[in-house]
Amino acid sequence: MGESDGLSVSASWDQTAYHNNLAKKSVCLAYSGGLDTSCILAWLLEKGYEVICFMADVGQEEDFDAAKSKAEKIGAKKCVVEDLREQFVTEFITPAIQCNAVYESVYLLGTSLARPVIARAMIEIARKEGCFAVSHGCTGKGNDQVRFELGFYALQPDIVVIAPWRDPEFYDRLPGRDALLDYAAKKGIPVSSTKAKPWSMDENLAHCSYEAGILEHPNTTPPADMWKLTVDPEKAPDEPEHFTISFHKGVPSKLEYTDSGKTKVATEAVELFTAANAIARRNGIGRIDILENRFVGIKSRGCYETPGLSMLRAAHIDIEGLTLDREVRALRDQFVTFNYSRILYNGLYFSPEREFLHASILESQKNVNGTVRCKVYKGLFGVEGRSSESKLYDAQESSMDELGGFAPSDTSGFILVNAIRLKKYGAMKKEARENL
């Protein structure tokens, strides 16, 4: 096997010899500071690799200085932290809002959106640091291994990928979270995960996800203290909160809201998204608990908090009703939205099909301009009104109180033409003595 095939290929391959042959070479590890990647860092060092840790700031509430210090204390040569929030919002979240991206009708793809921006920055760091390989802490059963590695190979085709959770030498020794916790204790690695609360979390500016542990039982109610971002809807404020969201070519361009009695306006991408998150979080917006179909073929339970993105997407859907042509919207919903969402979920962001669909998204949004007046209350989002200079809606034409240039008699021919095939179908069913 060539190095470009990675380290997780077959059980018969002598991986110990391979690790020994490559000892002292540099590896770039996607590091979070959590249990899995801290243990993987220690394991890579055991194998003799020099490790460069990479951390991406994609908006998670993280003490990066503490995580960086932790990595270096474990033995990393260095830990590089990159602020990717601006790229994350403008290049990845924004197109998802523009096409109303959603997987299996409910999941707004918070994790899927973050993986390509992380993969791209990580490959750049690996190049700068002269790393022959990259490594990650994704499980062998999940989607993220696919998302990261397809991105790695597209961005640098000759890269080597070390995937410990697909390496028998690693997972036979550390088969699960309890074993990892014991290993961390043995190595003196401090971790926040405990055997009492073993669920896994992944957070970014778009959402926070929860899985594993007790959540693997689909009929178990998530503990109240699990949810990190949002207020329990039942405990949210007793008064609704009002705000307006403006769009330019389908992109959220301005958020006007009130905070502590003061009127505020956010226009910069990260600032706007952060403000939207704050509004949604304090009003309990964006919690879901679902069973989804992973790309690898396994059903998985996931609990997600997607506060600001849930609101912005809902407002965008509303303004499209005023500004987007019916047939364009139908084609976009049936073809672009479905496939773009599936491509994101399956980790195919760096692909020709994604580029093709992205161009279609931009074309569909040329006239999606306007403002939506919104209200949130105890977990619910509502629209109170909308306006646009580029609207396709004509109040006079739609009115039931005036003709507005529309001749009702014209509808007779429209109905008769559309009835032609239905009459033929009804006659056929009657002849066959079948009921409609």
Image (cartoon, grey):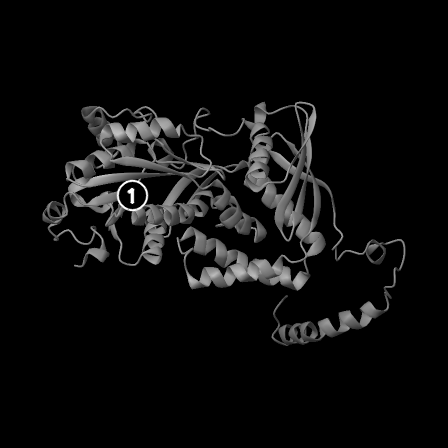
Residue 107: tell me if it is visible: no
Q: Give percent across and percent down for residue 157.
A: 30, 59
**Does 396 sit left or right of 351 as displayed?**
right
Disc count in the image?
1
Give the residue at x 72% y 71%: 418
Q: Which residue is the extreme one toward the right?
A: 402
Where does the C terminus fall, quadrant-wise? bottom right
Of residues 313 and 222, the one nearer the viewer is 313
Residue 365's image quarter?
Answer: bottom right
Q: Give percent across and percent down for residue 6.
A: 22, 53
**Residue behind mark 1:** 136
**Does 11 sit left or right of 112 as displayed?**
left
Give the residue at x 49% y 63%: 356
Relative to 434, is 154 above or below? above
Could you tell me the amino acid type at mark 1?
A: His
Helix, strand or loop status at disc 1? loop
Of residues 331 and 37, the one nearer the viewer is 37
Of residues 259 and 266, the one nearer the viewer is 266
Of residues 395 and 47, the one nearer the viewer is 47
Q: Give percent across and percent down for residue 33.
A: 33, 32
Residue 95: tell me if it is visible: yes
Residue 422's image quarter?
Answer: bottom right
Give the residue at x 45% y 63%: 353
At label 1, counting other C-alpha atoms closer than 10 Å, the crowd grade (few under 14, some 14-19, many 20 or more) is: many
Q: Give percent across and percent down for residue 339.
A: 49, 58
Give the residue at x 44% y 56%: 343
**Does 398 sit left or right of 191 as displayed?**
right
Where does the N terminus fall, quadrant-wise? bottom left
